[in-house]
Amino acid sequence: MKKFEGVFPVLITPMNEDYSVNYEGLKENVQHFLDQKVAGIIIVGSTGEFAALDDEEKEKIITQVSDQIEGHDTQLLVGIADERTDKVIEYAKFVEQTNADGHLLINSFYMTPTEEEAFHQFKDVNDVVTKPIMMYNNPFTANVDLENETIYKIDKELDKVQYIKESTGDIRKVRTLVENTDLVMFCGSDDLAYESFAVGATGWVSVAANIAPNSASKLYELMKAGDYEAARALNKDLLPLCEFLEDSGKYVQIVKKAMDLKGLNGGPSRKPRLGLTDEEVEKLKGLMEKLD
């Protein structure tokens, strides 16, 4: 299997006005990213409102997208998060039967597991899958910032955990993990993509890449080629959008509105999420002008 690298937009789940999943719109959105030849896509993640989807919806989304990407170079990762480890394993086993290339897994996000419990959550999944796992460390949504020693143990003992999406916003942690593990580092903080590539990240799980996939991919390619001056100039244009997404608390709604503005499929988010204000929509329009 080809190693995961580059920019992976983490996709929204488009909705109809009655809050049902817009499966035809999802197909159109996925085709858009396949046409843009992004390195990979991620579905049923936080941006995909996984916590607001039921099992039947998740399975239909996973099946539809995994069938659609067959034969394309674009890779597919699937979010398998849940509070209960047995549910995570159920999702993982379902994904194993599809064309998806791997799993994205965060520890329980409400139970606030101990370091040992978090380790065993990853171990229990590791022991039943054959496809690689991208570990997701995000204290802002999971209430736990995995300690470096826990991540070192996961890296050493769990063979399917081969990647990490690092979303603490601490560039020192990114650097430390790059230097002290064999895990392939993916930036998970949109506003630190440039810095993460500079210290050794080889991928970016990107919310912004939903809106500007070509700009995001170009930033990665420029950094990979060592053209730091051009990368800095591009990052200057990308950063305001990334900061808006990171700081607004409305990253799902922002992406959905952007997709609608691009003539693709966004729609509403399931409550309690509310839509953007008129002011936020105008800001988004301005941020999109320089990006592709």
Image (tube, rainbow, N blue to C red):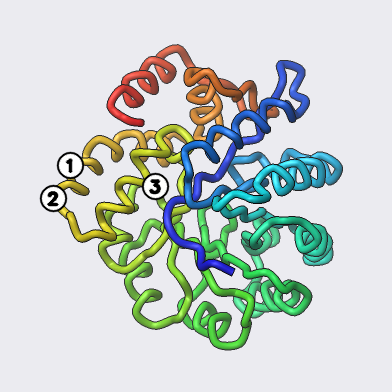
Residue for badge 1: 233
Circles 1 and 2: CB atoms closer than 8 Å: yes
Residue for badge 3: 190
Amino acid type of disc 2?
A: Glu
- Where residue 225 sits, quadrant-wise, is bottom left
At x 32%, y 60%, the residue is 196
Q: Give the alpha-carbon distance from disc 3 to disc 1, as whole Å.
A: 16 Å
Q: Is any atom of residue 142 visible in this view?
A: yes
Look at the numbered disc 3 and give the secondary structure of its residue. helix
Give x and y (percent) for residue 265. 60, 23
> Quarter of the image containing the N terminus?
bottom right
> Quarter of the image containing the C terminus?
top left
Residue extending farthest top: 278
Looking at the image, residue 198 sits to the left or right of residue 107; the answer is left
Give x and y (percent) for residue 224. 28, 60
Give x and y (percent) for residue 96. 77, 63
Q: Give the alpha-carbon distance from disc 1 to disc 2, as whole Å.
A: 6 Å
